[in-house]
Structures are given as structure tokens and as C-alpha cells.
Amino acid sequence: MNRILLIGGGGREDAIGRRIVDGGETLYCVSKNLNPSLARISRDYRVMDELSYEKIVQYAIEMKIDLMFVGPDPVLETPLVDLASKSGILVPSPSMAAARIETSKEYMRSFVERNGISGNIFSRIFTNGRDAAEFIRSSAMEFAIKPIGLTGGKGVRVMGVQINSREEAAAYAAEVAARDGKVLLEERISGEEFSLQVFSDGRNVSPMPLAQDYKRALEGDNGPNTGGMGSITGADHGLPFITPACRDSALSIIRSVVHHMNLEGNPFRGIMYGQFMQVDGTPKIVEINARFADPEGINVLYLLEENLPDILFRIAESSLGNYTRFLRKATTLKYIVPKGYGNSPQPGSLDIDLANMPEDLQIYYASVSGSPEKVQMTSSRALAVISRSDTIESASDRVEENLWRVKGNYYVRHDIGSREFIKAKLR
Ligand code: GLY
């Protein structure tokens, strides 16, 4: 049995960890929190700062780890992957240089532009807040105002969504530039967002089913942006409101990114996750990320028909191939969060009834502590309840039918995957 070290302790990592154990390998885990589910299935678990890369590599060497996999994005901004690879550990996660496709939006936009990759949108970097503010005031265009680096899904503000006036936009751009030394303005685009995750070994690309996540805290896509309140995938591996042609173009974009990164001598090994928006039937690049999405990674891992550790070894050894099998089922996932999540969370405890869990339902553990049957929430996401079924709507029904299993004071977006919600989107 191989020894696999997983970095991270959220819902996504719980899903990855379970697939590693299902694949017959021995799991080791390092994360900043003691995830009760990962703790139960790991041979050894170290609670430590996930950014302490030297300590993590030391631990990996001590434990004679064969392969290490990184879950969360902030870890990819450290030299952990490079250092572990140098120490002889196989790592199917991108190097620090390759992860810049996510960790620096400046790198991503200029990479896409210099390689003539389609799906790009107007963007401009400002180092001076006054210039950025002036540009916004004198333009007729609406903008998304973004920090260059990682934001945990919460630092981006869009005119007409979180920002109500041009003056407010100018002030926010100036604030970001003053704080970070730079600010990115991107043309505001509107349409359906979707996530396309792929495995990549640096040359070969193998796609996963399309997914859509819901970032707004409240039902009907209202309230503040969050890390993600839930997500869906369709049984045909597409989405009812994304055309097959748009999906194919998005995959061509991802293939082109991987190809050109390789040509530039910066090969991308790991999971690439493109966040796109369908605008007039074509995909526009919102972000390109260097990891499984959370929650969308949980949806696709629940459908994966192949052995995850085998895939991870093939990525690390550059022998992936172009096709991975996924079950032809739909999934709907809903995150259970503390009441007030996104504004003023009030974390309490939750009791979880795991008796006679149906085959088509799973509960994954995120930012909680305690035991699998009783957890204490933090201010972040707590439990991901996911079902797979023939349709997104029936998977949503199955999640709803099983919410009784979680008792406590929590909030969940019941609308995700519901008939009314999907119908409204199709309209
Ligand atoms: N689903 C949002 C993210 O993983 O960044």
C-alpha cells in the first residue's frame, strides 16, 4: 500500500481523502483543523499550519510518504510542492510557478493574452489607486474590481452587484491598490457561470463533468458572496443551461492553457479548474484555478468511476491519458453553514445521524471539530450533504429528504438544484 499525504481539512479534502482510502492506499493528513471524518480514516494526522512548508516536508519524509496531494489554494502559493518534489516525493499538484495561473490574476490575464487564447476579456492592472479611480470614472464600461492574489471568493466586487455607483467602484479600486500595491479591473460580463475541472499531467488533459456552484449566501442568489453554498452536475456531464458547443469551447481553452504552459517551460500538473461565463453562447474566462473546486470537486469525486490514487500517480508520472470515466448520474450538493454565515455567523453544534445512510447520499465534513456524530461549527462552512440521482432535481429532493439527519441551528440553501430554481434559470 502506498502512503499518500493530503494537505487540507475542508469538505473538498474529506472527499479526496475518502477516495484515496477507497482506492486502497494509506492516508496521512496535515491540516490546520482536526477534521473529524479525515481523522477517522487517516493512519496519522498532524494539525499544523498548512503554510509551514518546511515542517510539512520534514513530516512527509519522516512518514516515508510516496505521494503528496494539495487541496487548498493558499498552500499552492508556498514552495511546498517544489520542495517535496526535490525531496523525491511524487506530487500531482502544480509547482509554485505553475500555480500562478490561479495565485496571480495578473499572470493569468497576461499569459492568456500573449498566447492568443480565446475567452479573454478586457482587463487592466493599475499600480496607482488614483489612476484606477480616474479610469473607472471616465469609462462607460462596468467593471469587476479584483485583488491580484487569492481572495477566498470574497475580495471581488462587481459594479451592479456588490457596488452600486461608479464613485463606490472608484473608491474600492483605490482601496485595493493602496492595500496591495496593485488592482485589476476587468470588464463586467453577464451570463451563466460554470466550472470545468480537468486532470492534467502537463501535456494530457482529461475532463470532468461540468458543474455550477452557488456563491451567494442566501436563497435566490442573494446576500454576500461566500466560498460556495452548494453545487450541481448534470447526468449527461453537461448543464441544462450551458450549450454543448460552449462546453467544448471551454475545454479547448483549458487544453490550450495546458499546452502553452508546457511550451513556456512551466508545465501544469494537477487539477485545473476553469471558471467560465457563457456569454452569447461562448465561454469567457472568469478565473483559472489550480486545484479542485470546493464544493464542485466533491460533486465530481462522487461520480468518479476510476481509482483516484491511480490517477494521481499517473499525473505525477506524466502518463495520464485523455479520458477518465464518471458515472452518468446527476448530483446536487448543499452546504450546511452556521446561521448568519457570510455576515455574522453564529456557530453552534450539530448532531449527525449516520445510521443506515442510503447508498446515494454522503455527508462530508468541512470546518468543524468534534466527532463524526457531533460537531462544533466554526464561522465557516460545516457539512456538505450531497446526493446522486438521475436528475439534478431528484438529487436535490434526496438531500432535502435527508436533512433530518443533521440536527442543530444551521442554515442551508434549499433552493439549490430544486425544480423551481432550475426552471427559473432555463427561463
Ligand atoms: N467554487 C469556488 C472555488 O472553489 O473557488
Image (tube, helix red, strand yellow):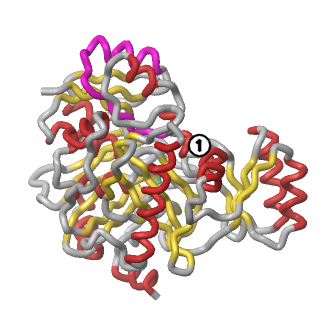
Evaluate whether residue 301 shows in this view: yes
Q: Is residue 420 shown above or below 363?
A: below
Q: Where is residue 399 in the image (x, y as percent from the top left)?
A: 26, 65
**Quadrant holding the N terminus:** top left
The image shows a total of numbered marks equal to: 1
Residue at (28% x, 67% y) in the render: 400
**173 or 32, nearer to the observer:** 173
Q: Position of residue 202 (x, y in %)?
A: 39, 42
Residue at (25% x, 39% y) in the render: 314
Evaluate whether residue 369 shows in this view: no
309 sits left or right of 191 in the view: left
Secondary structure state at the residue bearing disc 1: loop
145 sits left or right of 132 in the view: left
Residue at (12% x, 36% y) in the render: 24
Q: Is residue 370 shown above or below 146?
A: above
From the image, tell me which residue sits under label 1: 150
Name the image quarter holding residue 285: bottom right
- What amino acid does circle 1 point to? Leu
Residue at (19% x, 40% y) in the render: 310
Name the image quarter holding residue 19: top left
Q: Give the range drawn in magenta.
A: 53-73
Name the image quarter holding residue 247: bottom left
- How many residues crowd mark 1 within 10 Å: few (<14), some (14–19), many (20+)? some
262 sits left or right of 145 in the view: left
Residue 240 on the magenta segment = no
Q: Position of residue 158 (x, y in %)?
A: 68, 63
